[in-house]
Amino acid sequence: MSNRTLILDSILHQYLLDQSLREHPQQAALREATRAHPLARMQSSPEQGELMQLLVKLMGARLTLEIGVFTGYSALTVALALPPDGRVLACDLSTEYTALGLPFWERAGVAGKIELVLGPALATLDARLGRGEGGSYDFAFIDADKPNYDNYYERCLQLLRPGGLIAIDNVLWSGRVARPAELDPDTAALRTLNAKLHHDERVDLAMVPIGDGLTLARKR
């Protein structure tokens, strides 16, 4: 037992993947296809995806949100964990990036579970609230433009049912959030949101050092 999180070197990280990861073949194929993308660093880590799958299954989630799709690995991952009538509302701006993932969703047999909406995510979320969908979603994953993270969080809180879970990516931001001299807008937005969530009595909270940092906020 240790009183702090173990630091993973490349050997131990590979061991973790070898002994834990149970990817669908299309998940592995999509990760490989994304590896050559200039922005491949934006893809969620496979161990983070595995954790989200487990959480979605534990919750018995059926309706989920994703804000920031990129090439579609996390949407595919969550969709695979949902029951046959489950749905992912996937919000993104880029036709180019999301198009890479579409064939993998199809081959995995989950394309029918994923509703991809292209356009500003805040407008999409506000439209769903306007349609009376508040309090109906089980799970939300936020991984998009950092200055809007707080806005996405507030919309997700409205859309989630009590007991629903929000997962927020990149909350450790390669360590920059802990360095006061880092003042760029993305780092500042993440630092501000992290401080807000720490004291937000509307949720139960855990910040997990997996991938680039993942905050789990359960709506009370």
Image: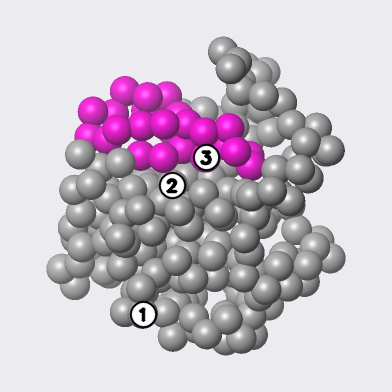
Residue 59 occupies quadrant: bottom left
Is residue 26 covered in magenta? no
Establish if 164 lies above or below 8.
Answer: below
Viewer-nearest of discs 1 and 2: 1
Residue shown at 41% from the left, 40% from the top: 216
Residue shown at 30% from the left, 41% from the top: 218
Q: Which residue is mark 3?
A: 214
Marks 3/1: CA–CA distance: 27 Å
Q: Is residue 60 visible?
A: yes
Residue shown at 47% from the left, 31% from the top: 207
Marks 1/2: CA–CA distance: 22 Å
Which element type, helix, strand or loop, lies under badge 2? strand
Q: Amino acid at mark 1?
A: Pro
Where are the magenta residues, as a range? 193-217
Counting from the top left corner in percent of width and height, residue 156 is at 31, 52
Q: Is residue 171 visible?
A: no
Sequence order check: which comes first, mark 3 or mark 1?
1
Which element type, helix, strand or loop, lies under badge 3? strand
Q: Which residue is mark 2?
A: 167
Sequence order check: which comes first, mark 2 or mark 3?
2
Counting from the top left corner in percent of width and height, residue 108 is at 58, 81
